[in-house]
């Protein structure tokens, strides 16, 4: 005898219908009949009479109905509690889609700050191409996105500026620039560059910066991944303009060298992206509170 069988008997007694009982329990009518017959064999007594399509409980059936109803009620209550706990657990998880450079080098401080304030919460981070972040937020696959220099606004999405990433000239250890600490904007004119592809927002931001300063770069390579660009630079294939934070401590001064742009401010904006219309879970609201100052600043712009 199992809980499901007790539920079938209870539902049959409540509805008086084999078809409705079958529907409630996602089984066939013959399965309902078979389970009740098994109960009768185990209990060694008749549980109901069926006359003119109407079901009437026997005295034995009435006694057993009371027990079956109590056990089924406890079981149903336990299931509801477990499902509620499961929903709460899911509500404690925040899903983030981020471009690789921001995910690795920028948002870790935000994640650590959030987890310190919300020790029971969970965060999952998925690294995505910039174009995928829009659809992740729009479809609800992610609660938040982080991206650099969005090249377009999207209906229904909020793009909140939360950080600025200093851009630097990155050279390999074998470059004549390796011994220098800075370069001027005009120095960039004569260099071979390894850039992101032209579709990338960061590339468009770099191109706009160079145009403003009258620099026409020599583009030697276009790659689609910041780590691939760093590898190419380290091999001596050229230099690049990348976020200073993209150079790890064990790389800086060893395989790669970051040089400051001495005569111009070159800061790449980082945006937090989220849905304007979708309601946020309690955990997501707590995560958003980290950026309260950024929201106030954006409201004054």
Image (cartoon, rainbow, N blue to C red):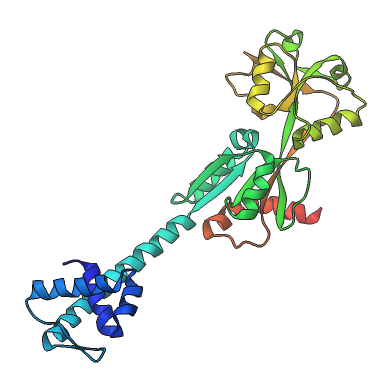
Above or below for 157 versus 207: below
In the rendered image, which quarter contains the N terminus? bottom left
Extreme-right residue of the structure: 214
Nearer-the-camera pick, 186 or 198: 198
Dividing the picture into quadrants, the one containing residue 228 is top right
Extreme-bottom residue of the structure: 52
Nearer-the-camera pick, 98 or 293: 98
x then y, percent, for residue 132: 65, 43
Residue 266, visible in the rendered structure: no
Extreme-left residue of the structure: 44
In this figure, what is the number of numbered marks? 0
Above or below for 7 versus 256: below
Residue 202, visible in the rendered structure: yes
User: Residue at image x 59%, y 52%?
Assistant: 143
Nearer-the-camera pick, 139 or 177: 139
On screen, residue 80 versus residue 5, left or right, reads right
x then y, percent, for residue 212: 91, 31
On screen, residue 139 versus residue 4, left or right, reads right
x then y, percent, for residue 51: 21, 91
Dividing the picture into quadrants, the one containing residue 73 is bottom left
On screen, residue 209 versus residue 114, left or right, reads right
Dividing the picture into quadrants, the one containing residue 278 is bottom right
């Amino acid at each position: 005898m199992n809980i499901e069988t007790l539920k079938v008997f209870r539902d049959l007694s409540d509805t008086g219908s084999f078809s409705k009982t079958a529907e409630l329990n996602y089984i066939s009518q013959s399965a309902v009949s078979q389970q009740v017959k098994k109960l009768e064999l185990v209990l060694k007594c008749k549980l109901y009479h069926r006359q003119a399509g109407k079901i009437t409980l026997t005295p034995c059936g009435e006694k057993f109905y009371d027990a079956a109803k109590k056990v089924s009620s406890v079981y149903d209550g336990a299931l509801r509690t477990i499902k509620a706990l499961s929903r709460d657990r899911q509500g404690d998880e925040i899903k983030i889609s981020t471009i690789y450079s921001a995910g690795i080098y920028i948002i870790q401080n935000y994640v650590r700050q959030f987890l310190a304030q919300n020790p029971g919460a969970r965060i999952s981070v998925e690294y995505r191409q910039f174009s995928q972040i829009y659809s992740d937020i729009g479809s609800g696959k992610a609660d938040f996105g982080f991206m650099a220099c969005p090249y377009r606004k999207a209906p229904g999405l909020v793009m909140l500026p939360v950080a600025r990433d200093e851009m630097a000239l990155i050279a390999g250890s074998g470059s004549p620039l390796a011994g220098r600490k800075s370069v001027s904007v005009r120095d960039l004119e004569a260099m071979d560059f390894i850039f992101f592809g032209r579709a990338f927002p960061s590339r468009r931001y770099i191109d706009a910066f160079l145009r403003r300063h009258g620099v026409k770069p020599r583009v030697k390579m276009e790659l689609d991944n910041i780590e691939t660009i760093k590898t190419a630079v380290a091999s001596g294939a050229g230099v690049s303009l990348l976020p200073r934070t993209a150079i790890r401590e064990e790389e800086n001064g060893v395989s790669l060298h970051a040089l400051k742009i001495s005569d111009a401010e070159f800061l790449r904006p980082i945006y937090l992206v989220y849905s304007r219309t979708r309601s946020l879970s309690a955990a997501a609201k707590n995560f958003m509170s980290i950026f309260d100052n950024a929201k106030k600043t954006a409201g004054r712009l």
